[in-house]
Amino acid sequence: MSGHSKWATTKHKKAAIDAKRGKLFAKLIKNIEIAAKMGGPDSSGNPTLFDAIQKAKKQSVPNKNIDSAVKRGGGLEGGAVDYETIMYEVYGPQGVAILVECLTDNRNRAAMEVRTAVTRNGGTLADPGSVSRLFDRKGVVVVPKAQETREIGEDDVLEATLDAGADDVNDLGESLQILSEAGDVVEVRTALQGAAIDYDSADVEFVASMDIPVDKDAAIKVFKLVDALEDLDDVQNVFSNVDVPESVLAELDADEE
């Protein structure tokens, strides 16, 4: 789940230890196919494809799988699937707003599975526009502080990316999150490369304009709902405006020990 504030830290840690590697691989491959279909199979002239490939490589997706996905999406070999993007708007526990981004070849199946996951886990489907108005499309680049040759700080990434369109930098603990306008994410990523700064991911995401803090019980329910949604094959991303305070995160961590 992608979000803002405290949850961004949790999301990044969660992604780093995601045990559902087969499901993660499938989602990354979908992104590559779509990027190749929309902008062509040449990653040097298709920045969206370039970033999709880089993200897959960072998650150790085999090169042969990546190459096949590029060829399928670019129409260079058979087996391509015609995917469409669908966005579902959801209200979760304690009024938390959730956007569910699906990439599917079967609209009816996606709708049924999302509806079932939402209703079984304490959420409600919202009217179009009621949730999405609470989010802005932003470029989001995540940079690990620990680089091969040095430690990176906020000043380093701001100096490298401010002229490229970076608006804000958030400290995620072991990483830094750079926010920009959606159209500037490629420039920000390119500026980092020019400054010899490695990055973990560079995506366009929905970032909440205002977060909703939750207590422990609500946090557990929200996490359960989000996990159920992320388990669905057609779901690519889940975005939320939930803000889990550090004290609540500490309680949840203690319960797991």
Image (cartoon, rainbow, N blue to C red):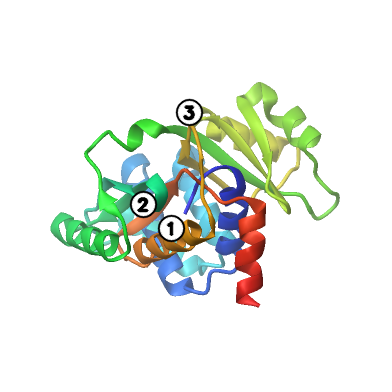
Q: Residue furthest left?
A: 108
Identify the residue shown where x is 63% and y is 37%: 178
Task: State the image coordinates of residue 186 (x, y, percent, origin top left).
Answer: 54, 34
Q: Amino acid at mark 3?
A: Gly
Confirm or deny contact between disc 2 and disc 3 (CB under 8 A). Answer: no
Between disc 1 and disc 3, the foreground one is 1
Ranked by sequence position, the earlier of labels 2 and 3 is: 2
Q: Is residue 192 visible?
A: yes
Identify the residue shown where x is 68% and y is 30%: 161
Ranked by sequence position, the earlier of labels 2 and 1 is: 2
Asked whether, in this view, residue 103 is left or right of residue 142, the answer is left
Query: Looking at this view, is 170 or 95 the one in front?
Result: 95
Mark carried by residue 183? 3
Q: Which residue is mark 2?
A: 92
Asked whether, in this view, residue 166 is left or right of residue 3, the answer is right
Asked whether, in this view, residue 229 is left or right of residue 4, the answer is left
66 to 184, vertically: above or below: below
Identify the residue shown where x is 33% and y is 47%: 91
Q: Which residue is mark 1?
A: 222
Q: Amino acid at mark 2?
A: Gly
237 to 120, vertically: above or below: above
Confirm or deny contact between disc 2 and disc 1 (CB under 8 A). Answer: yes
Asked whether, in this view, residue 115 is left or right of residue 146, the answer is left
